[in-house]
Image (cartoon, coloured by chain):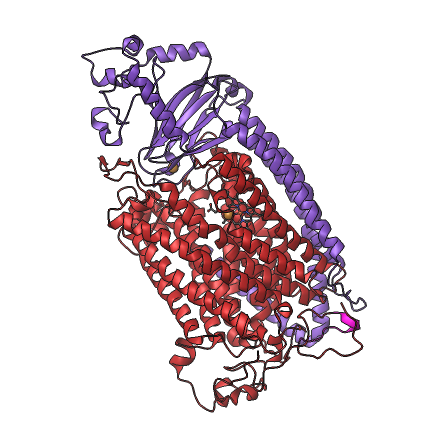
Amino acid sequence: MSNDVSLHGHSEVAASHNAHHEEHGVHHHKEAFITKYVFSQDHKMICKQFIITGMIWAILGGLMSVLFRLQLGYPDTSFPILEDIFGKWAQGGKIKPEFYYALVTMHGTVLVFFVLTGGLSGTFANFLIPLQVGARDMASPFLNMLSYWFFFMASVVILSSLFVQTGPASGGWTVYPPLSALGDASQGSKAGIDLWITGMALFVVSSLLGGLNYITTILNMRTKGMSMTRLPLTIWAILFTAILGVLSFPVLLSGLILLLFDRHAGTSFYLSDIFISSTQKALPNEGGSAILFQHLFWFLGHPEVYIIILPAMGLVSEVLSVNSRKPVFGYMAMVGSLFAITILAFLVWAHHMFITGLNPFLGSVFVLLTLLIAVPSAIKVFNWLTTLWKGNIRFTPAMLFAIGFVSLFISGGLTGIFLGNSTLDIALHDTYFVVAHFHIVMGVSAFFGMFAGVYHWFPKMYGRYLNNTMGYIHFWVTLIGAYLIFWPMHYEGLAGMPRRYMDYSGWVSFRQFGDLNRFISTVAMVVFAVQLMFVFNFFYSIFKGRRVTNQNPWGAATMEWTTPIRPGHGNWPGEIPEVHRWAYDYAKDGREFIPQTEPVSGNESKH
Amino acid sequence: MANFFIILLLLLGFLITFQIAKASEYVAVLKGEKKAFEQQNKVNGFLMIMFLVFGLIGVYWCNELLKGKILGVAASQHGQAIDKMLYITLAITGVVFFLTQIILFWFAYKYQYSEKRKAFYFPHDNRLEVVWTVIPAIALTVLVGFGLIYWFRITGDAPADALQVEVTGKQFGWIFRYPGNDGVFGKKYFKNIDDGANNSLGLIWEDPATHDDIVVNQEMYVVVNRPVKLIINSRDVIHDVGLPHFRMKMDAVPGTPTTLWFTPLYTTEEMKKMNNNPEFEYEISCDQMCGSGHYTMKGIVNVVSPEEFILWKAKQQSNYSQVFPAQGAPAAKDSTKPASVSTSQTKDEVAKASLNH
Ligand code: HEM
Ligand SMILES: [Cu+2]
Ligand SMILES: [Cu+2]
C-alpha cells in the first residue's frame, strides 16, 4: 500500500537535513507566500494553522472564564476597569447578568468545540497521520485545506457574534430551547443565537471534511508494512475520534436546523404551551417537545466528550511509552478499549437527561450502558500505570503532562461513576459536582494531553525545542492549580449548589461558599497567567528556541522521526521507508529502542 | 492605579521567570546536556512524590474544612437513600482513587531515570488484563444494582394519600397550586394566562373544579411526614425544581408535565434547630439555565405540622374568589358542585402526567 509518488520535485527536503541552512535559502522552486502559509495544502502547515487558531481561541475562552470568575469570587465588588472595556455590559463596573451568561456560554462553546475539538484534532490529526502512517500527505490535501478554512470561517462568525448589539448566545453551551428559540425570553436568543448556529454549522462542515479525510488516509495510505496493528495508538485514537465525529455531528446539525426553523419559520418542533412574561403574550405553538432537542443535542454531545478525550488518550499513550522507555502495556487491549468506548459513546447520551422526566425504565437502561463505559476507561488507566512500572522514566515536560493527564483522568472518571448512577444524579445534576467532573475529566485532562503532544512534537513541527524550565513551571503550577480549583467544587456540588448562577449571596444554603469561591477565582487567575507564559514560550521558541540537531531527539520508534529534522512538503526526501514491526519496541533485547522501519532480525525474541 | 501596578508586577515576575528559564538553558549547555537532564529529572521525580504526599494531605484537609457545609442530614426519605448510596459509591471509588493515585506517583518516583536501570520489556499479560476488566465490572454491577433499586423506588408512583401540589416555573419565579377541598386541579390552558387579570396559570373558570384551586407564589407549604407529590410545569422555558435539602430535583418543561414525590422528615423549625441556623429555609433553587434571572429564581418550601398546614390552608382564598369577589365563594364552601366534570379532568391530568413515565 505504499504511495511513493512524490508530490513536487523536492530537493529542498534533502537539503534541510542540514539544520544550519535557512529554510528560504534552499528552495529551488519558491512557493508563493499565499500557497505556503495561507492556502497551504501541506498537512504540516495546516496543523500549524489549526494550533495557532486554537491557541487564540484558548486565550479568549480562558479570558472569559477569568472575567466570570471575577464575578463569582467578588460578587459585591465593582471593577471600574470593566466598564472602561465593556461599556454597557459592565455598567458601574459590575458585570450584568446578560453579559455573565454570554461569557459562560461562549466560554463553553469556544473551549469545547473550537479549542478541544477543532484545535486538538485539527492539530494532531493533521500533523501525525501522514507522518506516522508513512504518507506524503492527507488523502485529499485540498479538502484538508477547506477543513481549516471552514473552521476559520466558523471562528469568524462566532467571534463576530460577540459584537452584536444584543450580545452573543447566552443560554449555555447546550443551547436548550425554548430559551434559545425565543428572543423575547433572553437577549442572547436574538441575533446572537443565529450567529451561533451559523458558526456551528460551518464548524460541523469543517469537522466532517477533516474527519473523512483522516479516516480515508488512515485506511488507505499507510506505507508498505504498516498493518493496522502496527499503527501507533495516536493514530488509532484519531481514527476512532474521526468516526465518532462523522457519525454524530450531522445529528447536531439537524437539531440546530430544526431550531432555526422554530425561530424563523413558525414551526413547533421544540415549542409548546409557552407564555412569555416579558411581552405578556402566549405563543401560538403547540405540540412540540423541548426534550427532543436534548436528545438530538446529546446524541452528539456525549460522543463529543470522547471526541475531545480520545486524541488526548492517544497522545498520552505514545508519550508515556516513549519516555518510560518501554512498550505501552497491552496494546491490543488499548485498541480494544478505544473501540468499546467508541461504540458505547453512542449509547449513553440520555445520562445527561435523567431528570428531564425521562421514562425511569429508559433511564435505567442508560445507567447500565453508562457504567459499562467505565470499564474500558478503567482498563486504559491500569494499562498506563503498568506502562510506567519498571520503566526508566525521563521527565520531559511532555512526560509530566502525560502523567498529570492520568491523574486527572482518574479523578474525573471516578466522579462520572457518581453521575452515571441516576439515583445520585437526582441530587447532583446541574450542580457544581458536574462542573468539577467534566472540567477535570475533559477540560483539564484534554488540555494536559494536548500539552503533552505539543511539548513532544514541537521539535518535529518547528525544528526547535520549547524551553524546558518554563515547561516545568507551566506543568506544576497548572497541575496544582487545576486540583485547587476543581477539587473543592465537588463539595459545593454535594451541597446542591447549582451551576450557572452569577451570585449566590441571596441564598441561605449557598452563600456559605463565598470564601471558597473567592479562593477558586484567585487560583484560576494564577493558572491563566501561567498559560500565557506557555503561549509566550511557544511563539518565542518558534523563532528563538534551541535548535534540534538530532533527527530523533526522544529516541522514539515511530516513523515521524525518520524524516528530516525539517521535513518539506512530501515528508520523506526519497522513498517512504517500509515498516517491519509495531510501534513500541522499546527495551527489547537490551536495546534502547528499535525503529519501526528496521527489519526484524532472525535472532530477535518474540513478544 | 492599582490595576497598573498589578500589571507591572505581573510583567516583572514574568520577565524574571523568562530570564531564569533562558539562563538555565545556557547552564545546561555549559554543564553538558546529560548532566543537566539528570539533575532536572531528579528534581521532577522528587516533586512527584511531594505532590503525592501534599496532595493526600490536601485531600484530607479539604474534607475537614468542607464536610460540614454539605447541608447536613437529608431531609426526606428519598434523600436519605440517596445519601446512603452516595457513601457506598464514595467508599468504592475512594479506594480506587487512593490506590491508583498512589501507584501513579509512586511509580513515577520509583522508576525515574537512572543510568543503572534498564527498562523492563513487558508488552502485555493477558491474565492481568482480564483481572482488571473483571474487577471494575463487578464493582460497577454492584453499584448499578443498588442504584436501580433506589431509582425505581424514587421514581415509582407516589402513595395514594400524598399531598398534591402543582408547581409552575416562569421567568423568574414559582407558582404553586393546591387543588382545594375537592382534591382536583381544575383545567387550565396556557392561552388563558393573564397576569393582569390575576390568572397566572390560565385557569379555565368555566370548569368548576378551578373554583376552589388555591394559587400562591414563591412559597409552598407541605406537611411533615406526609408524602407530597409535585406536578411540575413550566410557563415559558425549561426550569428545574431543585430541592437540595431533600436531595430531589426535576425539570419543569413547557408542554410536558413531570412529577416528583418525596416525604419530608423534618419541619422547617426542626431544621433551624438541627442546623443551628435561625435563617434556615428549605430553598427551591432553579437548576436549569432559564435566562438572565436564573440565579434569583428562588422558592421556599415550608414544612409544617399537620395542624399548621390546616390553619394555613384555611386562610387562603381561592384564585377564583380573588378574581370574582362578587360570587365570593370561599374555597371551603365549594364542595357542593357536581363532581362529574372534575373526575374526567383528573383522568386527563393523570394521563398527561403519566406520559412521562
Ligand atoms: C467514567 C466514565 C464517565 C461517566 C460514567 C460519566 C458520566 C456522566 C454523567 C452521568 C453526566 C451528566 C451529569 C449531569 O448533568 O447531571 C456527565 C456529564 C459530563 N461528562 Fe461525564 N462521565 C464519564 C466520563 C467522562 C469523560 C471521559 C468526559 C470527557 C472527556 C466526560 C465529560 C462530561 C461532560 C462535558 C459533562 C457535562 C456536560 C454538561 O452538562 O455541560 N465525562 N458525565
Ligand atoms: Cu455524557
Ligand atoms: Cu432557572
Placement of the N terminus of chain A among the 4 image quadrants: bottom right
Which residue is rendered at x = 24% and y = 25% of the image?
B199
State left or right for residue A153 relative to residue A491. left
Residue A210, given in percent of the width and then of the height, sits at: 45, 67
Residue A124, given in percent of the width and then of the height, sits at: 53, 67
Q: Nearer the viewer, residue B210 or B103?
A: B210
- Above/below status of A23 relative to B70: below
Is residue B218 visible in the rendered structure shown here?
A: no
- Above/below status of B344 relative to A293: above
Chain B takes which shade in the image? purple
State left or right for residue B117 relative to residue B298. right
Q: Which residues are magenta?
A: A587-596
Q: Nearer the viewer, residue A573 or A143?
A: A143
Query: Quarter of the image holding residue B136?
Result: top right
Chain A takes which shade in the image? red
Placement of the C terminus of chain A among the 4 image quadrants: bottom right
Which residue is rendered at x = 34% and y = 15% of the image?
B180
> Is the magenta region chiefly helix, strand or loop?
loop
Membership of A268 in magenta stretch: no
Is residue A406 visible in the rendered structure shown here?
A: yes
Which residue is rendered at x = 57% and y = 54% of the image?
A341
